[in-house]
């Protein structure tokens, strides 16, 4: 792996997981020393993070980790809904039924007590949908959006009731794709994202109160 890719991957993961909190200044000398790379590949990595929207220039402070305001979250979900609905439609049209039948079985038996296992299954569903779309441009754009979604998910507390509800919503998406119903797949995605956004905003507003 190139040094710039190594630095980018490490910093992106730390931002998504919250190790590098919003407002953290990413000074070149400090970060290049910490990550064990020279300043040139670090600059390349930081430029990619700026393009991702995870880092921005702040007057008088240099590059800082961006904030995740309620306004930004709402805007993100507007974009996410359009992309995820189209991906679900294409997946329902072009899918390999056997792939989604297997996911269907797993969502029917998954336990929300194993949060890591549940999120891993969701990631596998995303990957299966991406593969089924057959559209590299759509998948590339979705990847950037999902980076921000993963970051936001870390900020909202995992609510057992919401997780259980989410399992049912994902199962609806998989059911529609298995059946090859484009309209139902898109509708199931719309319902899931509506409830997800409502839960995230509610959680953040409760913390701020």
Image (cartoon, grey):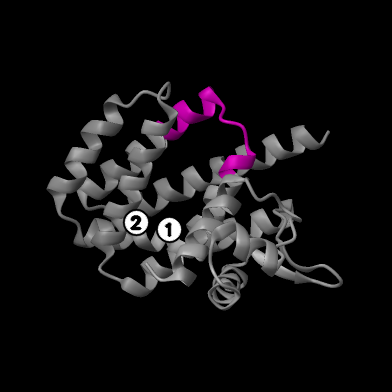
Q: Along the horizontal axis of the image, is 203 left or right of 114?
A: right
Which image quarter is the N terminus in?
bottom left
Residue situated in front as seen by the camera: 204 or 188: 204
Q: Evaluate if marks 2 and 1 touch, with contact meaning CB atoms under 8 Å apart.
A: yes
Segment colored magenta: 153-167
- Mark 2 Cα-neighbour bin, 10 Å: few <14, some 14–19, many ≥20: many
What distance separates the C-alpha of mark 2 from that of mark 1?
Answer: 6 Å
Which image quarter: residue 205? top right
Location of residue 82 in the rendering, given as x and y in whole percent from the top left corner = 48, 63
- Report helix, strand or loop for mark 2: helix
As drawn, 26 above or below 98 = below
Q: Which residue has dot 2 on it? A: 88
Residue 168 can be seen in this image: no
> Would residue 71 be counted in the magenta stretch?
no
- Report helix, strand or loop for mark 1: helix
Residue situated in front as seen by the camera: 187 or 54: 54
Q: Which residue corresponds to the image point at 48% horizontal and 44% vertical from the top-left?
A: 191
Q: Which residue corresponds to the image point at 52% horizontal and 53% vertical from the top-left?
A: 13
> Would residue 157 be counted in the magenta stretch?
yes
Q: Which residue has dot 1 on it? A: 84
By secondary structure, the bulk of the magenta-drawn segment is best described as helix
Location of residue 102 in the rendering, given as x and y in whole percent from the top left corner = 18, 39
Q: Which residue corresponds to the image point at 61% horizontal and 37% vertical from the top-left?
A: 199
């Amino acid at each position: 792996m190139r040094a710039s890719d190594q630095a980018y991957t490490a910093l992106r993961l730390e931002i998504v997981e919250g190790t590098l909190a919003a407002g953290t200044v990413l000074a070149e000398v400090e970060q290049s020393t910490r990550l064990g790379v020279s300043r040139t590949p670090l600059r390349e990595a930081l430029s990619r993070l700026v393009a991702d929207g995870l880092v921005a220039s702040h007057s008088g402070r240099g590059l800082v980790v961006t904030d995740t305001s309620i306004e930004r979250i709402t805007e993100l979900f507007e974009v996410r809904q359009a992309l995820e609905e189209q991906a679900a439609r294409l997946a329902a049209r072009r899918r390999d039924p056997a792939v989604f039948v297997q996911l269907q079985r797993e969502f029917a038996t998954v336990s929300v007590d194993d949060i890591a296992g549940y999120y891993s299954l969701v990631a596998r569903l995303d990957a299966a949908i991406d593969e089924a779309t057959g559209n590299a441009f759509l998948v590339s754009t979705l990847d950037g959006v999902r980076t921000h979604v993963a970051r936001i998910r870390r900020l909202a507390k995992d609510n057992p009731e919401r997780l259980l509800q989410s399992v049912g919503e994902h199962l609806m998406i998989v059911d529609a794709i298995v059946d090859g119903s484009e309209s139902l797949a898109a509708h199931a995605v719309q319902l899931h994202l509506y409830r997800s956004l409502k839960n995230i905003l509610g959680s953040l507003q409760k913390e701020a109160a």
